[in-house]
Image (cartoon, rainbow, N blue to C red):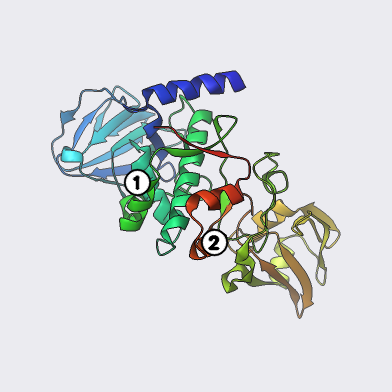
C-alpha cells in the first residue's frame, strides 16, 4: 500500500502544473431528490476535465433522479453525471452555496449528489473561513491553511479515482464556498501556496480541532491512529475562557442514555492527558467517544471533563472543544499573538514533520 501511495503521490506532483494535485472534488451537502443549478452563462458537458462544454439555455436548471436516471429540465440524460461551468470563471450557486469552479450533479445511492470541482487553493479559501475565525492573527491562519491543505491532499490520495475526495461537513473539513472567503483567508492561502506537512516524504494526516484545553491528545488516544507526529504537547489555550464549559444532563437526558432514575455517571478510565476513555452510566459502561456521540458533539464538547452530582441529574465541567489531536486552533491564536510564525506553530503541534513545497 505504501508503494502504491508513493506512486500516486509522484503522479500528482508531476501533474501539478496543470490540474493534478491542485484539483479537488468536494461533495457539497447530502444527496437530494432535486438539485437546482444557477449561474451566469452556464455551459454543460461530461464529467471530465477535458470535456467539451456546450452553452445551456437559461441561467437556471433543475435536475431530478427519476427511475434511476438523471433528468435535466424534464429530459432524461444518457449518462449518470453532468458537469456545469459558468462563463468567465463566474460562480455557480447550488445546494445553498456559491462556489468557484465546476459543479457536477451525479447519480448517487439514493438521490443526486452535488460535487464541486475546483483548484485546491480556491477550495482552501472556503475551508479556512469555515474552520477558523478570520479575525485570528495571520500566522495562525497560515498554520491552519497548511494543515487544511495537507489534510485535503492526504484524503485525495486515499480516495484517488473515487467520485469525490471529501465532504463539506465537520466530518471532513467544513467548506462553505465563497460565503466563507475574505481577504484574510486569501492572504493566508496565497502566502503558503503549495506548502504541505510531510513525514517520510508523505503528506501527513493533519488533524486539527478548536481547543484542547491545555494539552493536546495523541493520535492513538483521540483517533485510534498511532501516528508519530500526533503526540500530546502543551498548549496555551487552557487559560482562555473559551476553553472551559459546563453541561447539565437532566433525568430525561440520562434516561435517553440508558440510565435508570437516580443512576450516576462516572469516568472509570482516562487517557494520560486526563480525557475520558470509558464512561459508566448507571451499570452500563460505554466507550467515551460513543458516549460523546450519543450526548451530541456540540453539547459535550470534549472528553476532558469531571462529573458531579446535581439535583435531578449530573453536571459535567470540562475544557476544550474537539478530539484534541494535532493543531489546536485557539492555541495557534495565542502563539501567533506571542510572535510565533506559522512554521513554528506547525512544528509544535506536529513534531518531527517537514514543510515541503509540493507545487
Residue at horizontal 68%, vertical 54%? 233
Q: Which residue sits furthest bottom? A: 311
In the picture of the structure, the residue carrying the numbered disc 1 is 190
Residue 160 can be seen, yes or no: yes
Q: Is residue 313 left or right of residue 153?
A: right
**Viewer-closest of 230 and 260:** 230
Q: Residues within 10 Å of mark 2 (few under 14, many from 20)?
A: many
Residue at horizontal 20%, vertical 27%? 53
Q: Distance between the residues labelled 2 and 1?
A: 21 Å
Q: Residue 243 appears at what percent x and percent y?
A: 61, 68
| Circles 2 and 1: CB atoms closer than 8 Å | no
Q: In this view, does 352 lie to the left or right of 190?
A: right
Q: Residue 236 appears at what percent x and percent y?
A: 61, 64
Residue 116 can be seen, yes or no: no
Quarter of the image with the N terminus in it: top right
**Viewer-closest of 74 and 300:** 300
Judging from the image, what secondary structure is the residue with disc 1 in? helix
In the picture of the structure, the residue carrying the numbered disc 2 is 335
Res 50 → quadrant = top left
Identify the mark nearer the N-term, 2 or 1.
1
**Viewer-closest of 294 and 247:** 247
Residue at horizontal 57%, vertical 46%? 207
Amino acid at each position: 500500500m505504501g508503494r502504491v501511495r508513493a506512486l500516486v503521490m509522484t503522479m500528482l506532483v508531476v501533474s501539478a502544473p496543470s490540474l493534478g494535485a491542485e484539483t479537488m472534488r468536494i461533495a457539497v451537502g447530502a444527496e437530494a431528490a432535486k438539485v437546482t443549478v444557477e449561474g451566469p452563462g452556464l455551459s454543460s458537458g461530461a464529467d471530465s476535465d477535458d470535456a467539451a462544454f456546450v452553452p445551456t439555455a437559461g441561467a437556471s436548471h433543475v435536475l431530478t433522479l427519476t427511475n434511476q436516471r438523471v433528468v435535466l429540465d424534464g429530459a432524461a440524460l444518457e449518462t449518470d453525471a453532468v458537469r456545469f461551468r459558468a462563463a468567465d470563471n463566474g460562480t455557480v450557486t447550488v445546494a445553498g452555496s456559491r462556489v468557484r469552479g465546476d459543479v457536477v450533479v451525479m447519480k448517487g445511492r439514493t438521490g443526486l449528489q452535488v460535487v464541486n470541482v475546483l483548484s485546491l487553493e480556491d477550495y482552501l479559501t472556503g475551508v479556512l473561513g469555515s474552520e477558523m475565525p478570520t479575525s485570528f492573527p495571520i500566522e495562525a491562519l497560515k498554520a491552519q491553511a497548511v494543515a487544511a491543505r495537507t489534510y485535503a491532499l492526504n484524503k485525495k490520495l486515499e480516495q484517488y479515482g473515487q467520485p469525490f475526495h471529501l465532504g463539506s461537513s465537520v466530518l471532513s473539513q467544513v467548506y462553505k464556498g465563497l460565503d466563507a472567503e475574505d481577504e484574510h483567508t486569501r492572504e493566508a492561502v496565497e502566502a503558503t501556496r503549495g506548502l504541505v506537512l510531510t513525514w517520510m516524504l508523505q503528506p501527513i494526516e493533519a488533524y486539527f480541532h478548536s481547543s484542547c484545553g491545555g494539552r493536546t491528545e495523541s493520535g492513538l488516544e483521540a483517533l485510534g491512529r498511532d501516528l508519530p507526529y500526533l503526540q500530546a504537547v502543551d498548549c496555551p489555550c487552557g487559560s482562555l475562557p473559551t476553553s472551559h464549559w459546563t453541561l447539565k444532563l437532566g433525568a430525561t437526558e440520562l434516561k435517553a442514555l440508558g440510565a435508570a432514575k437516580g443512576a450516576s455517571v462516572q469516568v472509570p478510565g482516562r487517557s494520560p492527558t486526563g480525557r475520558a476513555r470509558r464512561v459508566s452510566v448507571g451499570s452500563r459502561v460505554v466507550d467515551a467517544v460513543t458516549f460523546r456521540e450519543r450526548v451530541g458533539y456540540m453539547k459535550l464538547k470534549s472528553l476532558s471533563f469531571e462529573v458531579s452530582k446535581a439535583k435531578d441529574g449530573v453536571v459535567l465541567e470540562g475544557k476544550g472543544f474537539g478530539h484534541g489531536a494535532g493543531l489546536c486552533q485557539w492555541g495557534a491564536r495565542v502563539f501567533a499573538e506571542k510572535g510565533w510564525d506559522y512554521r513554528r506553530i506547525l512544528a509544535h503541534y506536529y513534531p518531527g514533520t517537514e514543510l515541503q513545497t509540493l507545487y
